[in-house]
Amino acid sequence: MIVLSPDSLNEIYARHPGWYPAIANPQSAPVFIDGLADIMAQFDLILLDSYGVLCRGSTPIEGAAEAIQQLRANNIPFCVVSNDTLTNRSVAAEKYQSRGFDFTADEVLTSLDITEQYLQGLTNHNRIGVIAPLEHPSNHLLEGMVRLNGCNGEIPENIATLLFLTGAGWTAKMQENMVTTANGRQFELLVGNPDIGAPHGDHVTATPGYFIADLVEQTIQKAKPVLFGKPDPVIFSMAIKQHQITDPCRVLMVGDTLYTDILGGNAMGFKTLLLQCGVYQNEDIMEVIASTGISPHYVAPGL
């Protein structure tokens, strides 16, 4: 497990601006509110990040389940939009129910769902190396690929594409071996989870976005990574299409990370709400906003 500070998290994002949508900030400074209840009536759809908004690791965040019940009581549609690449719609409901949330499969959309759509269109798997544990919900779509976890991170000579699916089980030694065997080579780069890090307990731990940034920086990869999750617009577009939304201003994206949730939501024309209970917990939030240059419409301590 690699632990990151919020500052290092933002510094890594900032070194790769070409990977992400252009900054499109609100015209005015963020408004501080107590929580989602203060503004939810203004919107036709609420999009919710998962880690840092609903839970930290597998632990629910205080007040999150109650906020979901308020949305239900007021008949306000919502969808969890997460860069979770260990969960797709087939297992989402059961996973969240174990954490105290009563979501249906239709109320969760993950970057794994987007990644699986891409993988279904592939015919040649034997030149793809994938970072994912040997037990994974997408195993039926990964057949024929080289599982780099099983190679201790070493990339075989025939591999031309690297798919960074999930960091579960991926170690610092595997990362070192991957970088060593990638030197002098160029790859097509695919990223199921573009997050640099995610909150787990009291720490922010490295996720696939970190591993691909480290590889690119150490081996001078030239290809622009293909992102299957936030802040790329594909996952947002699928969510609003599913809910038949035509006016993006009537959508609220709620997240805890400026470079994924807020940057991506602003770029789509959504309103955005940044929560302080995730990766920026205990940080001066206005300093973080100033340092990144990315600003939400609203800021709240929690959901």
Image (cartoon, helix red, strand yellow):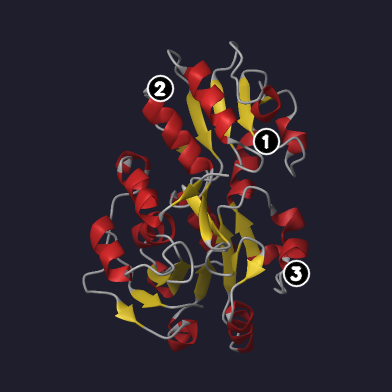
Which residue is painted at 56% across and 62% down in the image?
51
Against 285, is 83 above or below? above
Structural crowding at the residue carrying mark 3, measured as other residues with C-alpha within 10 Å and reported as few (<14), some (14–19) or many (≥20): few
The earlier-in-sequence mark between 2 and 3 is: 3
Which residue is painted at 41% across and 29% down in the image?
216
The earlier-in-sequence mark between 1 and 3 is: 3
Q: Amino acid under label 1?
A: Gln
Please give the residue where the numbered disc 3 appears in the rendered image.
97
* Cα–Cα span, label 2 and label 3: 42 Å
Q: Amino acid under label 2?
A: Thr
Residue 227 seen in the figure: no
- In the picture, the quarter occupied by the N terminus is top right
Structural crowding at the residue carrying mark 1, measured as other residues with C-alpha within 10 Å and reported as few (<14), some (14–19) or many (≥20): few
* Cα–Cα span, label 2 and label 1: 30 Å
Q: Nearer the viewer, mark 1 or mark 3?
A: 3
Image coords of residue 14 (percent x, y): 31, 46
Tell me whether the residue at label 2 lies in contact with that at label 3, contact meaning CB atoms closer than 8 angstroms.
Answer: no
Please give the residue where the numbered disc 1 appears in the rendered image.
120
